[in-house]
């Protein structure tokens, strides 16, 4: 039975047969002697104020005064298919059956639980906005529209997941964003064939170019100001309903070291901080490997006074430098994960006290040397400096292969490993665009907003990495270079 009956009893029976073992399904009959309307909805997904004030009361008063049907719900439509009715109810809408009519009406009464807009937890900002995305797509779109109230801001909606039917919205500037990249992005999203998409991280993994790469190729952000800034650069923002993070693409390697605060402070301060982040990237990636290499193979490059100091601290350590570094790095990662999983006050205490106690005890008992504690602490601080969590995680992961090649081949292994990593970065793509841009391929003009940031009045054009249709983003002034 696919059609809707003109008898209310038959429709209610059919609905309950379809939605069995659903105790939160509410079926409301309206009409004293002979029911005229039946309203069906899921209690926990529906705005009860909207139903009571805009549906139940008008219908009841209309029956008492024998007036024509009037409902104060802006979003309503007629349907004649049971699958559409079932889908509408499970998505939080109400369905109204009318006696002697072979169609139903879907009423927009969605009202599921949602949290208020708060400051993003993973992306703290000193001078930026203190608003973060939430789990409702419509609210997230509204946050972006506040930053870009322009008619060229377009939204295309897709659906992913056979069971979840998750709504995915693509936001972009029609006169700026490249249509070829848009079609590529839409095709990849449409090709995702899974039961459900729970969060944006899952979708990002499905649509990225190289799933086996340790480096992220799409940015996940909780900040509306950051997402809006990327849209203005000619990139695309993908909003996944029920997820507090949005996807930004295409991206480049250097974009993971840029922060929204960089454009809120003086350009000299911003450039210094970016240089610090790049230094932290290399430090977090290579410092443990360099320590292993210098202590095991290439100790002749260390000054004699430092060698004597290191030898004194390592005189009681029974382990090889590689095993010593491996133990400390794994301990650090366990402390980090423990601090994240525990409640915030307890997690901070465990991270601080655990690090101090374990480090001091390990040195006193002769398990590790003082210099090793300094190396591990330096690498931990370096990964925290990187503003993007996914890029910081990639550095943490690649640190271990670099330690292994340093153990077997010394400084030569580190050089070869670095060449492999940089070659891999140059070969990566993000939505079909170069991941290494503007360094590979070289676009000197785009270097104005990479490792250093020049004054804003000199950044006249959008970066070529996103392949925008309109490169100019601000008017040229006298004395400004191209």
Image (cartoon, rainbow, N blue to C red):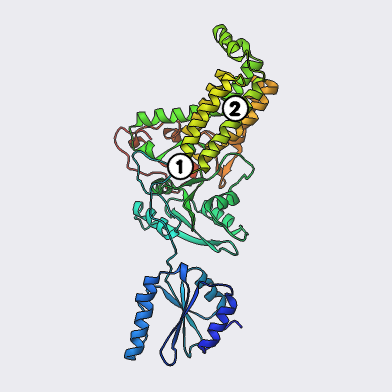
Instruction: Estimate the x, y position of residue 394 in percent, counting from the top left.
Output: 57, 37
Residue occupying the point 50% across, 34% down:
351
Residue underneath mark 1: 344
76 vs 360: above or below: below
Instruction: Estimate the x, y position of residue 423 in percent, counting from the top left.
Output: 61, 32
Disc 1/disc 2 C-alpha distance (Å): 24 Å
Tell which of 251 and 465 is nearer to you. Answer: 251
- Quarter in which the N terminus is drawn: bottom right
Which of the two labelled residues, at mark 1 and mark 2, occupies the earlier sequence position? 2
Residue occupying the point 45% across, 31% down:
451
Residue occupying the point 40% across, 47% down:
232
Q: In the picture provided, is 65 more to the left or to the right than 282?
A: left
Residue underneath mark 2: 328
Q: Is residue 67 visible?
A: no
Residue occupying the point 62% across, 16% down:
294
Tell which of 395 and 16 is nearer to you. Answer: 16
């Amino acid at each position: 039975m696919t059609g809707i009956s003109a008898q209310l009893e038959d429709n209610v029976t059919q609905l309950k047969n379809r939605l069995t073992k659903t105790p939160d399904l509410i079926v409301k009959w309206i009409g004293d002697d002979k029911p005229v309307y039946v309203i069906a909805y899921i209690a926990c997904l529906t705005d009860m104020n909207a139903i009571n004030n805009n549906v139940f009361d008008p219908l009841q008063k209309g029956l008492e005064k024998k007036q024509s049907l009037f409902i104060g719900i802006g979003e309503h439509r007629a349907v004649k298919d049971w699958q559409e009715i079932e889908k509408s109810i499970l998505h939080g809408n109400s369905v109204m059956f009318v006696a002697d009519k072979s169609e139903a009406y879907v009423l927009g009464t969605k009202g599921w639980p949602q949290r208020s807009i708060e400051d993003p937890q993973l992306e703290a900002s000193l001078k930026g906005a203190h608003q973060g995305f939430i789990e409702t797509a419509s609210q997230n779109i509204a946050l972006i529209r506040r930053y870009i109230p322009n008619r060229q801001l377009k939204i295309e909606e897709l659906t992913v997941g056979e069971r979840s039917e998750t709504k995915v919205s693509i936001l972009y500037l029609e006169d700026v964003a490249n249509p070829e990249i848009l079609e590529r992005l839409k095709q990849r999203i449409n090709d995702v064939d899974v039961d459900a998409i729970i969060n944006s991280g899952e979708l990002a993994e499905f649509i990225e170019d190289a799933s086996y790469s340790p480096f992220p190729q799409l940015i996940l952000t909780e900040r509306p100001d950051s997402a809006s800034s990327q849209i203005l650069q000619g990139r695309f923002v993908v909003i996944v309903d029920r997820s507090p993070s949005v996807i930004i693409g295409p991206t480049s390697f250097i974009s993971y070291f840029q922060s929204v605060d960089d454009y809120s402070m003086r350009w000299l301060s911003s450039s210094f901080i970016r240089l610090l982040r790049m230094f932290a990237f290399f430090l977090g990636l290579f410092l443990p490997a360099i320590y292993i290499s210098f202590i095991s193979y290439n100790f002749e490059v260390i000054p004699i006074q430092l060698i004597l100091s290191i030898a004194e601290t390592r005189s009681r350590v029974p382990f090889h430098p590689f095993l010593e570094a491996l133990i400390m790095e794994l301990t650090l990662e366990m402390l980090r994960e423990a601090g994240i999983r525990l409640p915030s006050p307890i997690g901070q205490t465990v991270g601080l006290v655990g690090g101090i106690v374990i480090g001091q005890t390990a040195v006193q008992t002769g398990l590790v040397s003082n210099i090793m504690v300094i190396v591990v602490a330096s690498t931990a601080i370096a990964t925290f400096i990187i503003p993007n969590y996914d890029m910081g995680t990639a550095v943490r992961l690649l640190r271990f292969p670099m330690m292994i090649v340093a153990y077997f081949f010394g400084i030569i292994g580190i050089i070869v490993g670095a060449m492999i990593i940089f070659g891999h970065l140059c070969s990566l793509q993000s939505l079909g665009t170069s991941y290494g841009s503007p360094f590979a391929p070289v676009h000197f003009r785009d270097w104005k907003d990479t490792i250093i940031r020049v004054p804003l009045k000199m950044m006249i054009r959008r970066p070529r990495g996103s392949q925008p249709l309109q490169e100019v983003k601000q008017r040229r002034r006298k004395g400004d270079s191209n």
